[in-house]
Amino acid sequence: MPPRAKYTREEITEIALGIVAESGAESLNARSLAEAMGTSTRPIFTAFRNMEELESTVRESAMKVFGQYAEKETPDMPAFKQVGIQMITFAKEKPKLFRLLFMKEQAHTFNFEEMFSSMLGVTADKCIEYIMNDYSLSKEDAMTLFRHVWIFTYGIGVLLSSNICLFSENEISDMLSVQFRSMLIMIKSSHAAK
């Protein structure tokens, strides 16, 4: 019977996620991970077939961290705005994980719907549902609103996570509100004009 592995996949993933959160995805390699673990690279390649598998697992873990942010509730704030605020908070507090999830070059280019389902998944579905229920919009209109506001929110996250620009919480809240209301008015007025 082979000896029990010194580190589990979960432990290795957690240490690797810590490296990425602290130093960025480009800092994660077998050597840096082994050094952080205080061991050789052997336990890494016992638990994972290769670095690509480990990186994929780290990305999934980072998405779970993002999901925890996205699910935080703020009293007296519309649910959809909460998700936007939390995405921006994630970009400010975990900039390297934000970059891993939302700014890393992809193997192929997605259209918005593909990106929407692969990167945002359940979080995006909840947002669409909130918009439909809270503002009496069709799914198509809710998707249009979501797309525009998400891209705007994403841009703020990029500016913050890259240290390009700094916004106060009030500025962020006001910008998201204006963008959301503007899009909502545009969508509703386009129906009224028909």
Image (spheres, rainbow, N blue to C red):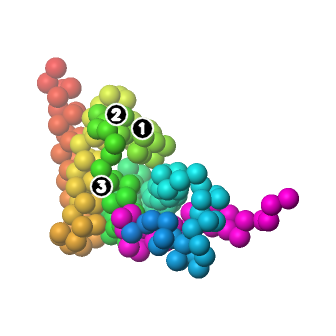
> Residues under labels 2 and 3: Cα distance?
17 Å
Q: Residue drawn 33% across and 60% down?
A: 99
Dot 1 falls on a residue whose secondary structure is helix
Q: Is residue 125 left or right of residue 141?
A: right
Q: Is residue 71 visible?
A: no
Check if residue 6 falls in the magenta segment.
Answer: yes
Q: Residue drawn 59% across and 79% down?
A: 38
Residue occupied by mark 2? 113
Residue occupied by mark 1? 117
Q: Is residue 17 above or below residue 113?
A: below
Amino acid residing under circle 3: Met
Quarter residue 11 falls in: bottom right
| Front residue (pair 40, 165) | 40
Dot 2 falls on a residue whose secondary structure is helix
Sequence-wise, the earlier of marks 2 and 3 is: 3
Task: Report the magenta stretch's main SS.
Answer: helix
Q: Residue drawn 38% across and 63% down?
A: 25
Q: Quadrant of the N terminus?
A: bottom right
Q: Is residue 185 left or right of residue 57?
A: left
**How far across and down, in percent of the image, does residue 130 sit?**
42, 42
Question: Is label 1 in contact with label 2 (beta carbons under 8 Å)?
Answer: yes
Q: What's the magenta region?
A: 1-26
Question: Is label 1 in contact with label 3 (beta carbons under 8 Å)?
Answer: no
Q: What's the mark number on residue 103?
A: 3
Question: Is label 2 in contact with label 3 (beta carbons under 8 Å)?
Answer: no
**How far across and down, in percent of the image, does residue 8 sit?**
68, 64
Q: Is residue 140 above or below residue 181?
A: above
